[in-house]
Image (spheres, grey):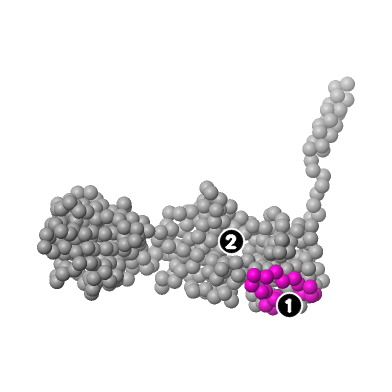
Amino acid sequence: MKNITKYISIIGLMVLLSSCIDTEFNDPEKAVYNPGLTANTTIKDLQNLFVEESLVPIDADVIILGTVIANDKTGNYYKSIVIQDSTAAIQIDLDAYELHNKYHVGDLVYIKCNGLFIGDYGGEAKLGSDYQGGIGRVPYAFIDNYLFKSDGGIPIEPKLVSPPLSPSDVNKLILLTDVQFGLNSLGLTYGDAENQVDRDIPLENCDGNSVIIRTSGYADFARDTIASGNGYLTAVLSFYNGEAQLKLRDPNEVVFNNSRCGDVYYHSFVDQGIDDFTSFSVTGSQAWYFDSQYGAVMNGFPSTNEDWLISPAYDLSDLSDMILRFRHTAGYTYPGFENDLKVFVCDDYDGESNPNSSGTWTELTGIIYPASNWSWTDSGDLDISGFNNNPNVYIAFKYTSSSSESCAWEIDNMRIRVN
């Protein structure tokens, strides 16, 4: 009797488990793909059908073959894949989730284009379906009527390029070397995951050329902090309304293991104000102030003043051949006004006291001053290499005036850079 009860219990458990298991299994993915198709058109020739601000139907027997270079695996692409052949690359939008489980990077894919459309997305050609007169996603039920995987696919090697980037490489997988994210972006994350909106981050090379990295707020790596060094990265190039943009496939393809080049610190007084700086008025009632149009401003008219604008401490550890540059202008000038507008550097200021009693300040020479009233002028390269490898460097702008001689001084775009 106990054995009968035991067997009945086991049978009951099996019935219960079977009721909880989904018996609708998908067919296993084939080990071999041979769709029996032959490409008769290159991606470049397909793109030649594109007409800006138009939706062009493809009504001929057009078949293209490309290698998948991007998919939705990390969430930076949504319901789309990008394929590339030897001539060009194009994005196709598909109304399905988890496309990366079927269309892996490196897979060869034939696309039978008859019945699809070439449409305009920000001036860029995109392949898909008609959605209310614009380019849309191929409906889920019809994807397999157009896309066919084939054997023999291997990942495409990225093309080595340098900014400025060419529209001829649109949607291609590219490699950029000796690049870094803009200084004002350091500490930010790749995307705005909190508000789930895209973020544009400037990427620059050591020659000062730049391009935007655009990351979706829904990307898996949107909350990751961007790399702070210099190095190389792999991305897919796109253009939106004529502006080049890069899209990362994976943050692991950002390899920034080198020290930064060019600007190490940059401060736009117009954009960032002077709140991070210390304004210390030694003499007089006036003080440095912020102007959203002109930057950091000091005008001591018509009294005697000594006013310092002192930067936060800059860490120049492991850096050499450093220079300081800024843009400035002066108004109401008089003979010898240059002697009243000076720039200093030190490494032992306490960050808050009267600079006449705290810090050993070294005056910087060779400053290029405005040749005429209110003419914005580049200061030239001011050598601060004597403070190389120093973790505690302060820059100070010192303004003086008298009741008989006073001018206005405006400063913007201060940068410390590798020479």
Residue at 79% across, 60% down:
142
Residue at 50% across, 65% down:
212
> Is residue 299 or residue 146 the one in the foreground?
299
Query: For residue 63, which quarter of the picture?
Result: bottom right
Quadrant location, the N terminus = top right
Q: Position of residue 224 (x, y in %)?
A: 50, 53
Residue at 24% across, 55% down:
288
Q: Amino acid at mark 2?
A: Arg
Q: Position of residue 191 (x, y in %)?
A: 52, 54
Query: For residue 416, which quarter of the picture?
Result: bottom left
Q: In this rendering, does residue 76 appear at all?
A: yes
Write down the residue under mark 1. 41
Residue farthest toward the top in the current orientation of the protein: 1
Write down the residue under mark 2. 249
Q: Position of residue 315 (x, y in %)?
A: 31, 57
Please indicate whether residue 281 sits to the left or right of residue 138 in the image.
Answer: left
Quadrant location, the C terminus = bottom left
Q: Main secondary structure of the magenta part?
A: loop
Task: Decide whether residue 76 is among the magenta residues.
Answer: no
What is the magenta range? 45-63
SS label for mark 2:
loop
